[in-house]
Image (spheres, rainbow, N blue to C red):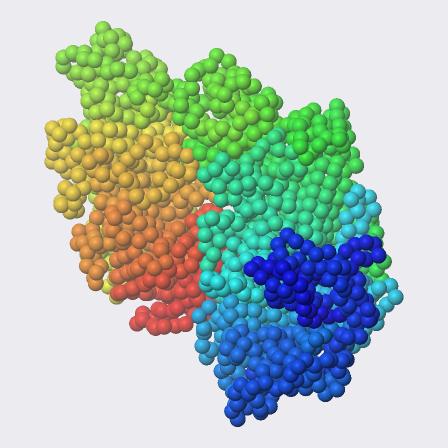
Amino acid sequence: MAGGQTVNIQGRGFDVWNSSAVKVNMFKYTDAGVRVNVPCTVTQVAPTSVTCVTTPAPTSICATSTDACLLDVSVTPSDGSTFAAPTLGQYNFSAALTPVISSISPIRGSTEGGTLVTITGSNFDQVTPSSGASTKRKLLYQQDSSLIGDGFRGLLQDASFGAGGISVTIAGVKCINVVQRNATTLTCETGRPAGGSGAKPLGLQPVLITVEGKGSASLNPAATQNVTYEYVDLWSRRTTWGGESPPMANDSVVIPAGTTVMLDVSPPKLYVLVIEGTLLIDPTAPVLHLQAHYILLRGGALIAGSADKPYPGLLTITLWGDKEAAKLLPTFGAKVLASLDGRIQLFGAPVAVPSWTHLNATVDITATSIVVNGQVNWKPGNTIVIASSSFDARHVDTTTITAVQLLPDGTSRLTVADPLQYTHLGVLRTYKGDPRQNVLDMRAEVAVLDRNIVIQGDPSTDLTMYGGHILSTWSRRVGIDRPILQLSNVELRQMGQAYQMGRYPVHFHMMGNATYGSYVANCSVHHTWNRGVTIHGTHQVRVSHTTAFATTGHTFFLEDGIETGNWFEGNLGILTQVSNGMLITDNNPATFWITHPDNILIGNTAAGSLEGFGFWYHLQDYPDGMSRTYSVCPKYERMGVFKNNVAHSNQFYGLRIHPEYYARVDPCGWSSGNAWNLVPAVFEGLVGYKNGVNCLVATQAGVVQFHNMTCADSGAGVKMLPVNGKDSGSQYEIIWNVETRSRVANPMMTMAGLFNALAVAQTQEGLRGSLVPWPSNRWIAAVTTPQALAGAYQHHAHMAIVNFTVVGFAAYSHSGNEFRALETCAHCKDFTGGSTSLTRSLTFLPPSAAVAAAPTALSGTAPYTAYYNTTVAQPRLFVWSWPHQAILVDTDGSLISSGTITAPIGGVSNGAWSLDDCRSVPGAAAEFNIATQPIPLGGCTAHSGLENNLFRPAECQKFNEGAAVICKPGVTFRRVMLNNHAPQTLAYRDMIVRDVETNMTAISHQSKYNEDGYVFTTAVGRSYWLHWDIPYRLDPSRFTMHKMDVLNKDSWLYIQSKYVVPPAAIAINENEQEPLQALPDPLNATSGTVFYSRTPTLNRFYSWNGTKYNDTTATVLVAGATDRTLTVRPLSCAGGAESCDVLGAPLGYELRNGTLYWSDEATWAGSTAAGGAKPTAGSNVNIPFSWNLVIDESPPALGRVLVEGNVTFSSRRDISFTAAAIVVRSNGSLTAGNATNSHPRKVELFLTGNRNSSNIVISKEMNAGAKVLAAVDGGTVGLYGAPVATRWTALAATATAGSSHLLLAGTGLGWGIGGKVTVTSSSYNWKQAETRSIVTVLDSPSAEALTAAGFSGTGPAIYDSLAAATPGYGSGSISTGGVSSIRQYNATLLTLDQPLVHDHYARVSNWDGLFVDLRPEVAYQSSNIVIRAADGPWQAEQDGGEQFGVRVLAYGPSLLQLDNVVVAYCGQAGLGRPCVHFDRLKALKPGRAANISAAAAAAGRQPAIADAAAAVELGLGLNPSYLSGSAVVSALDLAVWISTAYNPYMEESATSAMQKLFNASATNNTSSSVAAAVVAGNVIGGSLDVDTVRIDVRGSVVVDNLAWGTVKDMSGKSKFDNILPATFRVTTNNIVLRRNIAAGSERIGFYLAGEPCSTLPHPRLGGGKALRVANNTAHSNLVGLMLEANDSGQRCSGAAGFSMWRNWDYGVFTVKGILTSVTLVDITVVETKHVGVLILYMGALSEPVEINMAAMTLIGTSGPESCTICNGTSPMIAGKTADLTCHQKLSSQSYNRETPFSPAVGLASSMFTLLISPGPEFKPWDAVKGYPTILGITRVEGAMFGGYQGPSTCPGASPVHAGTYAIGAYYLLLAYQAPTQLATDKKGASITLLPFGRP
């Protein structure tokens, strides 16, 4: 019956030449008439015979028990011919003649053969032996005496047929010495496979018996085991090891290729086990333990069990290794089970079925039994883990099963050893009224950790965090198959090596496409130190039904981002923990970390991640690591499968898509037309609850869609992930939607959004036992809608919310959580947003709608219900935070209706429409196909009503006291963004959007995150005027509208800008627009078309400080169906003309002999140019070329005066000259006195005009403005007032509050009675500067006079040499306060008209001969020549004036010399028009320049230059313009500016202006292109939110100036304002800056582009001798000296000779981080409130940088007043205090904004880093934003520290002084600790290392 019978057929005609054509078939017909063939295999063909061997008879025609089964025989003797049956007769298959095999023993033996086996069966004796069949054949060879096989010695014989003609074959190898013991038993000796050299048979092999003359034996179907035999070398046998003993402890073992060894015993611990062959785990061994340091497979196999026959015993593999001592193998490391091209196949028994399940009923604390779903096979003694049901992932219970009871309802009751510590939910819920009956499944997971195969780290693992790891990789050698890693029912514990890349518990490493042949199934991975299962560079791996518990770092981990097709199904992760030493993202680990979207996740559960997430799709531009390629683009790839997964109890998010994901048609097709052709990426079926912040979130995404989601109880976790911007808890959230398609062309079902979802605010079941209280009281939303991505052209951010059921978002929770159904503008920074989201088919239910979806046996305490209203059905729909936050469009009335919204506060605004009208909007019908049809415009909309009154009452209703607005159907709204606006003064101001028809307004606040601009939403089809909220009139000089919503043609807007000074034309995108006669057609005109009329009309909408203006209006069309960017700019010149001089052509030559006088009627008679008559009030006046005119009377107030001749003021009488503007051009001149003789009489130049005055436009590049005295195009203005010896000096003694006297240093000052003086502040508050009038002046007062004036007592003296070295101070010895050492001839006593209000301390500290001068200055502000605004006092008023003063201008090749002149009420705020402006000066004609310079030098009028060589180098003499010995006071803009470029304050956008104004490199500041000027010996008071003195031109000389009163305007501005006005701002090098004093700025004293270090006299480094920048002082500022990189090309910037005292935050500082090395020499810093010197460097990681300091003087306290000035007695709160000696306008980022103050530090350690924060107002001064660089060093040489008394500073002070310390370590580099005293100098100052910084 089994075949194998040899049959001989006799005949003739058989084809011996084509024997393969000869066929023999046996056949029989079934009862159904079907022929069944049984081939007989032909083995020999002769001409007259054929021999064949029968094959087994099929049971379909021959029963196995029959003895007669006759088959006909047919033969095909040759190709194409057949003999038909029964020609040849029949063949009988007989069961009675068939031998049967029942068993073989033993079932395995040595691969050397020689094993005696016994085979049992039947019919072995029914054999007819053939002739000689049983005779032993010739001896082949004599075996030697070596031990072979199982120890049989003897002969190897040719025994094809043994006893009774029987042949036995095992695995294709003949068995020898076959002996028939009886009818049922045979014995034989196994042969040696493949001669011992080839590949040996692996695994169970068949046993074949052939009986001569009868055929093959069949297998007994009733046998209890398979009759198979296995060739194997047992570990325990000596034969396996060549006769030696098996391996000993610490041996290294190699199993060679072709060798199979079976591990049948537990060997001692090995060192290295290399498997090139096969290591089998003995399935019969009950317990095995394999231990080694390294187990390495090199093409070999490690096998335990099989998928069909799992390993039944207990196998433990322990990997050993010491973290410090282990030898690391390339790729594999240490303590490893590694496979290179090998097979690891470990199949444990299914001891945990299922591997995990759910609770069937809730259990509470102290419970000792649980009910789980399903009938489990778990056993007592198993360890189980129960996942957390709370917000805390650590709320897990692990315990041991003591009893298992299978219950009739199909569940199982488990009794456990330990009472439970936490409440765990077993809840299924649906909600009545939910149309989709979504199921909320909150059943905690229960998992078994035990398996019968265990792989573990050694006992040291938990101490060292250095466990074992499994790594399988592929060599990719030709002909080498991919490796296989198969783990089934395996337990891995104490695995993974902390902080070691590539050392994971399970690691599929660069295996290529595994085609699902490698997998991890039903395993448990727990208590690991580095991840769980890692798939790296490998595709199509299956990970299923595996539990990971207490893992570290990302657990189920795809590494590089190239891995695709991997299948994760039914896996469970519990308690994923932080890894602080791996990827940065491991600080916030995800249980499932997915780096390529094309993978499959089905039915997985992420049950708790500490500090992290459940599922994290982290998609990069390209794969990284070993898989780096640019042909794969993960964040643009199509989505694989995400379906029916669960995430709960995660610290932050259940599902996170971050940072970006945009599924596209062509993922890497940047050059194709499909670059942004997005396709939906669908995430389906997530169930989430108790996630700390969000159930799910997509950070930045394209068309990401969430389908069939169910989320509850999320958002109230204990922590928020640090984010910038508004954040709240929510169930569902998309933060940024990146979309190119407009919503009018985009059906809802093709949008990003949420479809068929359920959100539950707070379940009752989630408020019981250890699940309460909720840890946070933050806001919680059901869904949070997106914003647009700043800067992206894909700005059509919108979200669809369809078929969404909201439960319970109607009340406050017991823990104070504030719920709302919809939160708009996810993560938005303040005042951003404006995006639109669409809703449809929303259902709102109360919590009481909950019903059980399945029976659950609730036990324990009742749910917590206090403070929670379970019956309120009406939801809290939304809460708004700022205007224009978002637009919500209700497409069917399910969001906005009378059922969801109560009546508005105060009643319905307008009865013309009802909320229920929203149900009948276009597209609301149920049959409307939202999958294919875009929703028509016109649905009801919801908006923020905050600061927004644009909504018309007939169309919109306000709710919640105006915070929310609902608008009726048919009103469409559109978002517009605006930036690039100028002037700079508008940069951070609020913008007002004004409805032209209704005069209703909305505020839009500036934000950096609106691309440095604004966003606003408006109803379409209307006109809006845009202007800015500023007290005085300031119109935009440009703005850009961009990223408008693209809607339809009907959605147009008219945007108006108004101009008080009419521009000549309007440009759009820098193209001048043709004037239109009417408004453009909004439906057909091009977007950007402008209507502009230059005819001013009264602005009836608005007034500025009570003033209304006539203005012109430009109306720009913003078309509805486009988002074209539109830049609007008014032009001063029209028609493309380069010159548009409003003054016209030169007046021409009009010859007049002699001197002409203004008062003479004849002067004017007959003059065409001059108008033919003497000027009258208001008339314009022209003075033509060749006139020499003397102004000898005070004319009436004139209009514009144009001078092309020579005009001088009479020296015989006082003149008051009033005009709207005076322009001197074309070699004309206006003079009073000259360079050799000062003017003797008074000249008062009064200029008139307001912000609506006509501007004097010279060219496109020069708008001189109005109210101006200007020298242009070759004109000269020279005004030389009566000289004084000095404009300023220092106090010689302290002037106390209440005193009416000042004692000044020096005599012969030349200051007159009635003159104005200002004494500057000696405190931190510059506003303690006081201005008074002089009543008397007494030079060299006597001691008696001094005593009478209140100056008495003694004090330390100052040496004459100090005073002599201080120009302007006079000579002689000066005291700090007493009179005993004051020489009578060296001081001046002033009596003032009013007493002083503040103390002004005059102290010079002596530190062993080093004098530190802390005396305030006194400025003289009067002159006989005054230039001022006629309405000056009113203009300067903050609550009424226009802040529009006079300006003095020199432009181009013109000359301006002001000497001893007062310029007052000057500068025009916001316009960048300073009091005195040297603007792009050019060289004068050579002869003219030389003559003027020579005259000035001869008279000594031009200020001295300390170094003659420097003067030549700096190019002085090219244009000898200067401001000298003058007073510039009450400045309303900049005070003095030497500039190089057209006004950036007006013409640049806010952002680009900032970049230019605060960029140290001024590229065109060369003396060859722009001439320098001199500013010397002046007193300069004030500037408004701009620098006081600004120098942009190389070669400029700025010496001996005193300036104060630099004001920082903080009112009404956004927090992004980073303007830091300085008293002296120097943006370039190669200037002279000496002996200047910055005596009070609300921000910066000196803002300096540092000098090249080669010019500085460092004692070790060398350097220049003649310092260009030296001996400057800054006090009473926020920062004394702000240093930035120079533009010299040197990689080092520095400063020398600066003295800083009583500055608040810093003495010397480098905001944003300086970009070069720094050298500081001879710097004195005294009594800084925070830090004296702090240098922050920002640069490359490995760039060498040096900070060198030499000759530094740092003083902590200088005298008794140090303990009284701003000592904290009056509390400071948020930067405000009643103590007027403190700085009164601190930055929001200043230190010591609160009392008690922190310690003051002299010198702080420098910081070297990759990135520094940009500084105030928005960011801290000194926050490090990047990693430290590595090659920075600071050297301090020759420093003197004085007055640092540590905690003993100001003993007895109340409150206690925080202390002064010499040296401090930067706060981020040193943990705060007690100060450490380093040394004490001989003056008693402790030098202390003090860590400091923000708390």
Q: Which of 1010 and 195 lies nearest the eye of the viewer?
A: 195
For the point 64% across and 58% down, which residue is it?
77
Query: Which quadrant, please, contains the N terminus?
Result: bottom right
> Which residue occupies the extreme top position in the image?
1166
The image position of residue 1377, as x and y in percent, is 31, 56
Q: Is residue 1009 visible?
A: yes
Q: Which of 201 and 170 lies nearest the eye of the viewer?
A: 170
The image position of residue 493, as x and y in percent, is 61, 73
For the point 51% across and 91% down, which residue is it?
144
Q: Is residue 674 left or right of residue 1651?
A: right
The image position of residue 209, as x and y in percent, is 68, 77
Residue 929 sits in which quadrant? top right
Q: How many marks?
A: 0
In the image, residue 37 above or below residue 682: below
Q: Is residue 1619 left or right of residue 1695?
A: right
In the image, residue 1410 above or below residue 1818: below
Residue 373 sits in which quadrant? bottom right
For the point 40% across and 47% down, which residue is it?
1643
> Which residue occupies the extreme bottom position in the image?
145
In the image, residue 1250 above or below residue 1825: above
